[in-house]
Image: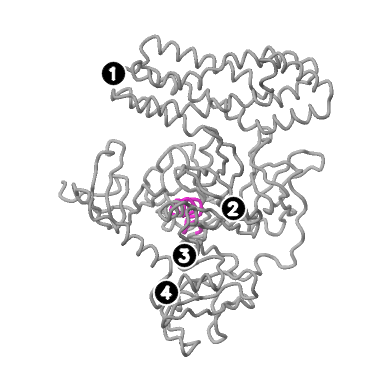
Amino acid sequence: MTMLDSLTPAVEFGCCGLCFPPFSVSLLQNYMNPLRLVLTLQEMEAIFINLEDLIKVHFNFLRAIDVSMMSGGSSLAKVFLEFKERLLIYGEYCSHMEYAQTTLNHLMANREDVHQKIEECTLKVQDGKFKLQDLLVVPMQRVLKYHLLLKELLSHSSDRPEKQQLKEALEAMQPVKLEEYGRPKIDGELKVRSIVNHTKQDRYLFLFDKVVIVCKRKGYNYEQKDIIELFCYKMTDDPMNNKDIKKWSYGFYLTHLQGKQGFQFFCKTEDMKRKWMEQFEMAMSNIKPEKAMANNHNFQMYTFDKTTNCKACKMFLRGTFYQGYQCVKCKVGAHKECLEVIPPCKISSPADQDSLNMGPKMVAVQNYHGNPAPPGKPVLTFQTGEVIELLRGDPESQWWEGRLILSKKSGYFPSSSVKPCPVDARPPNSRPPSREMDYSAYPWFAGNMERQQTDNLLKLHVTGTYLIRERPAEAERFAISIKFNEEVKHIKVVEKDNWIHITEAKKFESLLELVEYYQAHSLKESFKQLDTTLKYPYKSRERSTSRTVTRSPVFTPRVVGTAVARYNFAARDMRELSLREGDVVKIYSRIGGDQGWWKGETNGRIGWFPSTYVEEEGVQ
């Protein structure tokens, strides 16, 4: 079966997706040339961006596809690979589209000559059937179909060399302009409700390491509604809804760390909810790893331009983008699994050095996701309510430079998107430590939960099952809830003078320290009638029960070998298998060995792991 044969079922799909010469001719002749008479050069560039250059690239692209098709189509995948770098021109066009539409609408509303000229041009294009605003979006719609065409071709190709070329071409097309968000985790339909707007809305979500892109689905198109930056949020379960028999009642929360707008997500089934929460946990673990601050470092997920070795294990960092982590102070690179064993950082924190001369603080009054982009400068994206330290800001300039207080990211943003931050009488460092920590990863933390909701949840569990919940409307922010002798007991956690306790006789520096203490010591030290420790975190009980119920004994993979882990390996998504040095791994498949990956099981989990990180037993 040749590539040309495999193209037959995909030609109709592909032609409309790739070809837009009539569109380009229409824009050039009927809009761009006439509008040069009434618009300045700057206004033309703002509306049409780099469209003329884009059209040239696209014509060359189509010409190369035509040549490939006339010779049988066997080199079609190579065309995509050869044009990979040139197609990045779409990135500039797409990232400025919102600003182009805003500029166009503003000029039409405020200048009669522009309005009349555009109306005149529109009548020449199929009697006014398509407006200029609609035509400007066409290139963006086209580039988003390239990877879909390649998927279709891949599904109809049986020839091994051609199939491998198509796979490489598909991988080249998929990360266009999205790789800054990290690796894709999961996508699908959920219902979304913001904390401000209590109406459930049907949305299609794309989850990456760094962000969730929330879209409204319209047929085969997706209209972006929001971009949620995960660094600023924590995830908490909503176990109460799980007992509802209705569909779309299995929920969880994303809560903003600074108390700004949060989101509630609803899944159709409990299994779907579990998958989404696992992927969210993995994404948040990637951007905020547990050992990021180990040994005085400040590690952040980072894309290295050159091949880089891990400072600890001396092995290469894997991949082509976001290969690992870099300390923002000493610039050393590391694997996620090696963060805790990197030698101590000897460079003082920039925050410590600058604390005495920190710039003025600003607060975001609107979301800014990089549109419009600062010319030739790095972008600083943020959401309404985030606090920004102003590094450079000329009152007459449209662009200011700043740094986010929470994430320490820096870059440029529109000066109109912020305002001076109200002075907080209490500096952040004086707040109780428990308010500064994110406990969402711990199996005992339930987030915001009402007392009755907690009772209903814990009554279903065994004695000794407990959780820690937030009580934002109460003076004591946290409470311990535990099932004991068929009753659910609630204990207020007091925060005072930077200490935290449930009794004056025993105080702790953090909520985590308090929990760890009462996991080993009975609560009767403080409450005589409560002779129990904190035994079972409620999430651990739920997950173990879920695994017991859902695990199928029917399918048991065939073990083809065993190996011992030589190095630690931290999984980056749910398909990968985390390893600790010394783990014994059952090997189920070596099919991906030519790419450096095997499939196996250890510690009750199954997934892919680097074959070079293990030593196979019985092999000399």
Q: Nearer the viewer, mark 1 or mark 2?
A: 2
Mark 3 element type: loop
Q: Please give left or right for residue 30 compared with residue 548 in the image.
A: right
Q: Is residue 156 above or below residue 26?
A: below
The answer to which of marks 1 and 2 sits earlier in the sequence is 1
Mark 4 element type: strand
Label 3 and label 4: CA atoms lie apart by 14 Å
The answer to which of marks 2 and 3 sits earlier in the sequence is 2
Q: Which residues are magenta?
A: 278-293
Where residue 517 appears, x then y in whole percent?
Answer: 46, 78
Choose top left, top right, bottom left or bottom right for residue 10. Answer: top left
Q: Nearer the viewer, mark 4 or mark 2?
A: 2
Q: Are marks 3 and 4 in contact (CB under 8 Å)?
A: no
Q: Residues within 10 Å of mark 1 (few under 14, many from 20)?
A: few
The answer to which of marks 1 and 4 sits earlier in the sequence is 1
According to the picture, the residue beneath numbered tag 1 turns out to be: 1
The amino acid beneath tag 2 is: Arg
Where residue 619 appears, x then y in whole percent?
Answer: 16, 46
According to the picture, the residue beneath numbered tag 3 turns out to be: 442
Q: Residues within 10 Å of mark 2 (few under 14, many from 20)?
A: some
The amino acid beneath tag 3 is: Tyr
- Residue located at (22% from left, 51% from top): 556
According to the picture, the residue beneath numbered tag 4 turns out to be: 465
The answer to which of marks 3 and 1 sits earlier in the sequence is 1
Label 3 and label 1: CA atoms lie apart by 54 Å
Q: Are marks 4 and 2 in contact (CB under 8 Å)?
A: no
Mark 2 element type: strand
Q: Residues within 10 Å of mark 3 (few under 14, many from 20)?
A: some
Q: Nearer the viewer, mark 3 or mark 4?
A: 4
- Residue located at (46% from left, 42% from top): 183
According to the picture, the residue beneath numbered tag 2 turns out to be: 193
Where residue 612 appears, x then y in whole percent?
Answer: 29, 45
